[in-house]
Image: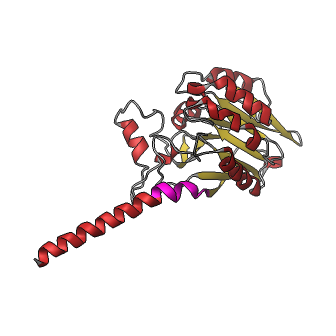
């Protein structure tokens, strides 16, 4: 009887713990946006840009949960970081064009001295890329997909480059390299929605930093395990409903060749509204000149 009672206590304890974990992952962590601060010394960054601050956000997946009101609170948090530039790496909407109209209002409120730049993600193309582009333009966000925008300070250049969605086949790295060839020397930062593109971009030797999203950091990470777990694992196992290009560089900072790669965990959710040990993220990157 004592043994049976012990088994029941263990079972009830596990059930209570499991329910608590479920409630936390569903109703607490998705709302707890973390501000991650990263300082990077980039060899080609000119002294006039020393201390340049980029706030990186990604993967809103605007839907019935990630509403314009919620996005406005994210914009307020971004503005509190006093960015020189806001960089957005795609997936503005989730599964319906009905929510695209909610983008311009919040995104038009960024307070950054050099404004905001963005590239599109796979979900933007899967919905209505044209409508997303019109919403970004209306908000004053500059799209740099397959393009280069150059900032100048005291005769020095900082190139902001972008790649359109690799997963959907719209990437044109050759066009970006050609634009860089025609520009003056300077540090180059690449926005690429899919993080595993870093292998290709780093091989060119033209980029100092790549900023990406797409992976959601795995969205669910098993505690005490270093590698983000659920989404990248399912991708590696070949599940067709999970997008590829996320399991080599799924979360945080990496060095790929001579280039830094940073993958933001995103702000929205996909497949299920759960986050565990993987809080949504606003990244503040401070760039330093040698």
Identify whether 121 is placed above or below 30. Answer: above
Pick the residue in front: 289 or 80.
80
Q: Quadrant of residue 98?
A: top right
**Dominant SS in magenta:** helix
Q: Residue at x 58, y 42 (%)?
A: 64
Q: Is residue 19 magenta?
A: no
What residue is drawn where x is 70% and y is 42%? 87
Q: Quadrant of residue 172?
A: top right
Query: Does 218 sit above or below residue 195?
Result: below
Task: State the residue in front, 33 or 285.
Answer: 33
Expressed as whole percent of the image width and height from the top left, the position of residue 265 reads: 55, 48
Number of marks in picture: 0
Residue drawn at 75 percent across, 37 percent down: 104
Q: Quadrant of the N terminus?
A: bottom left
Report x, y in % for residue 179: 73, 24
Q: Residue furthest bottom?
A: 2
Asked whether 27 falls inside the magenta stretch, the response is yes
Is residue 143 visible in the rendered image? The answer is no
Q: Is residue 46 left or right of 218 when viewed as pictured? A: right
Q: Is residue 225 above or below residue 108?
A: below
Q: Is residue 230 left or right of residue 44?
A: left
Q: Quick check: can you spot residue 141?
A: yes
The vertical placement of 177 against 39, above or below, is above
Along the viewing direction, whichever of 223 and 135 lies nearer the viewer:
135
For the point 39% across and 30% down, which residue is it? Answer: 240
The range drawn in magenta is 25-34
Residue 47 lies left or right of residue 218; in this view the side is right
């Amino acid at each position: 009887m004592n043994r049976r009672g012990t088994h029941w206590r263990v079972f009830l304890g596990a059930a209570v713990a499991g329910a608590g974990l479920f409630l936390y992952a569903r109703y607490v962590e998705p709302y707890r946006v973390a501000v991650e601060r990263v300082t990077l010394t980039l060899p080609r960054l000119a002294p006039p840009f020393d201390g340049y601050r980029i706030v990186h956000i990604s993967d809103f997946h605007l839907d019935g949960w990630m509403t314009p009101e919620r996005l406005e609170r994210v914009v307020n948090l971004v503005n509190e970081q006093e960015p020189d530039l806001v960089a957005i790496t795609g997936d503005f909407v989730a599964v319906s064009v009905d929510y695209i109209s909610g983008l311009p209002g919040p995104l038009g409120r960024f307070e950054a001295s050099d404004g905001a730049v963005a590239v599109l993600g796979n979900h933007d193309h899967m919905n209505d890329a044209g409508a997303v582009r019109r919403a970004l333009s209306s908000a004053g966000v500059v799209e740099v997909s397959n393009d280069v925008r150059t900032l100048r300070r005291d005769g020095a250049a900082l190139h902001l480059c972008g790649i359109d969605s690799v997963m959907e086949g719209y990437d044109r790295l050759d066009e970006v390299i050609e634009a860089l060839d025609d520009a003056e020397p300077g540090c180059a930062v690449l926005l690429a929605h899919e993080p595993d593109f870093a292998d290709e971009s780093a091989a060119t030797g033209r980029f100092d930093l790549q900023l990406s999203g797409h992976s959601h950091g795995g969205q669910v990470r098993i505690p005490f395990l270093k590698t983000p777990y659920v989404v990248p694992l399912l991708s590696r196992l070949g599940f067709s409903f999970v997008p590829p290009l996320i399991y080599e560089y799924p979360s945080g900072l990496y060095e790929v060749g001579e280039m830094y790669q940073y993958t933001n965990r995103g702000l929205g959710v996909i497949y299920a509204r759960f986050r565990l040990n993987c809080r949504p993220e606003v990244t503040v990157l401070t760039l330093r000149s040698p």
